[in-house]
Image (cartoon, rainbow, N blue to C red):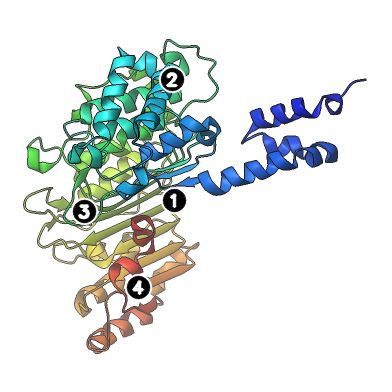
Amino acid sequence: MASILDLPLELLDNVSIHLLPNSLVPFVLSCKAIYLSSAHIIARHNAYVASWRHVSHDALYILHEIAHDPVIARYVESLRLHDRPNIDMLAYARSKESMEKIIEMVVSNPVLQDTIKNSEDFWPSELRDDNGHDRDRFNRPFSTTTALLWFLPNLKQFRQPEWFEVHRPMGGLVCMLRNRLIVFARNPASLKIAPELEERSLASLETLTPYSSTDGIRTVLQDVEPFMKLPKLYNVYSVSGIASNALEMNKGIPWRYWRRPYCWMNTDSYSSDSMPLRRLEIVYGNCNKRAIGGILSQTPHLEVFKYSHQNRWDGNGIAWDCGAFVAEVEKWVGNALRDLAINVDNIHNDYSGVAPDFTAFEHLEKLEVDASVLIGDTEMLLSHCLQYLLPGSIKTLIINLNKPDLGLVAMLVDGFKASKEILFPELETVVMRVIGCDEGNEKDFEDVRQVVEDEGIEWELLSKERFDVISWQGQICK
C-alpha cells in the first residue's frame, strides 16, 4: 500500500510549505523520515517565528514584507503599533516599486474588494496619501493600518496606535472598515464572497492592549468597543479612557452614540450573550455609572474587572460616585466576577457618594481596593466597617492606604479579627499596603499600623511610587 513517504521529496516540500505555520510541527513529527527530509523547511519555519511572531514595525513596512513573502502574514501573532518608526526605516517601503506591489496586494484582496466600492481606485489613493509628504497623514496612517489588519489571520495580541481613534477626521472610514472586518471575523457569511474562507482576519485575536497614557492625552473607550465583539477576544486593556453620557465635545463621547453614522453591523450577530470577554482592565479611566453599565451590559462572562479612576482634566470627564459605580458593576457582572480592583488616582474633590458595598458579589475571590473607596465621603457609619462590606466568598483582600488617618482606619477595621473566621471562612490573605511612605513620614503611620495588626491584618509599608505598587496598573501601562 502506498504511503505519504512514497511521494517525491519535492512534493513533500510543497506539502510542508502549505502547512506553514500552524500545521507544520505535527506533520514533520509524524515520522522520523519526514522530519529528516524537512530539515530545511523546519529551519525556515524557525526563522519566520523568530522574525515575525512578535512585530512592532510600521504598518507599511509589514505590508511591504508581506507583499514580497505572503507566508509572513500567517506568522504574526503579536502586533504593537504604539510608536512610529524612524522615517529612514521606511525609505525602501515607500519607493514607487514597493508601493505598487503593496497596492496590488491590497486591491486584489477579495474581502477588501467586497467591503469598499471602487476598491481599485480607493486603496491606491489612500495608501499613497497615508505615506506621502503630509505629516499628519504620515503620522496617522489610518487606511494603511486598517488594511494591514485584513492580512493577519493568526493575530492574537494587538496594541493599537494612540492615533487609531474613531472620532478623528478619518475615524468614520476606520470605524466602517473595522466594523466590517469584525463582522466578518464572527460570521464570514456576512460578506458576499465564499463563506468557506478559512483564514479570517482578527478571528484569533485574544488580547487588545492599550495605547495613549501620558502627556495629557485622553481617548474614548468607544475606540475599543468594536473589538469586544470578536469571537475569541478574552482580554481588553485601556489607558486614559473616557466614557460618559455627556454629549458635549469636551466631555467625552457617550458609549453607544458614535456607532450610529457608521454602523454596518447585523444586530442579531452582535448579541451580548455571545461575547466571550473574560478580562477588562481600565487604568486612569473616567467613567460614570451609565457608561460602565453600557460596557458591562455586553460582557456577561466577565471574570476579572479592574478599574483605576482619575479625576477630570479641565472639565474633561465626570465627577465620580464610587458607590453607584460599584453597584452598576454588580448589576451586570456581579455573579460572574472572581477578581475585582477599584482604585482612585488624584481625585481632587471629584469624589462623591457613599462607600460601595461588595457583599452582593457572591463569587468574588480577590478584591483590591483603596481605603478611600471603602470609607467614602460621608460620615463613617457602622455599616462601613470592613466585615459588613465584603462577600463571604472572598479569599484575598488588598487595601491600599496613602494617608495616616487613624480615626477612619480604626473604624474601618474595627471588629474584623473577631468576625473574619465566621463571616469569611475562605479568607487566606488580608493586607493593608501603605503607599508612598518614606523615612520622613514613617512615624505618622505607627499608630495606624498598631490598630491594623491588632485586627489580624498584615501590614506592608512601601516607599515605591503608586504606579509601581499597584502591579496590575504597571503591567498594562508598559
Residue type at mark 3? Cys
For the residue pair 126 and 158, the one nearer the viewer reads as 126
The residues tagged by marks 2 and 3 sit, at their Cα atoms, a distance apart of: 48 Å
Q: Residue at x 12, y 51 (%)?
A: 319
Task: Give the x, y percent position of residue 334.
Answer: 37, 44
Disc 1, SS: loop
- From the image, tell me which residue sits under label 3: 322
| Residue farthest toward the right in the current orientation of the protein | 1
Q: Earlier in the sequence, mark 4 or mark 2?
A: 2
Among the two numbered marks 4 and 1 on one chain, the one whose residue lies closer to the N terminus: 1
Determine contact: label 1, label 2, CB under 8 Å: no
In the rendered structure, which disc, 1 or 3, sits on the residue that comes first in sequence? 3
The amino acid type found where label 4 is placed reads Met
Residue that badge 1 annotates: 338
Which circle marks residue 109 in the picture?
2
Question: Which mark, by number, is residue 349?
Answer: none
Residues packed near mark 4 inside 10 Å, few (<14), some (14 to 19) or many (20 plus): many
Q: Which residue is mark 4?
A: 432
Q: Is residue 130 shown above or below 187?
A: below
Q: Is residue 389 among what the camera can see?
A: yes
Residues at marks 4 and 2, CA–CA distance in whole angstroms: 56 Å
Comparing marks 4 and 2, which lies closer to the viewer?
2
Disc nearer the start of the sequence (1/2): 2
Q: Secondary structure at mark 4?
A: strand
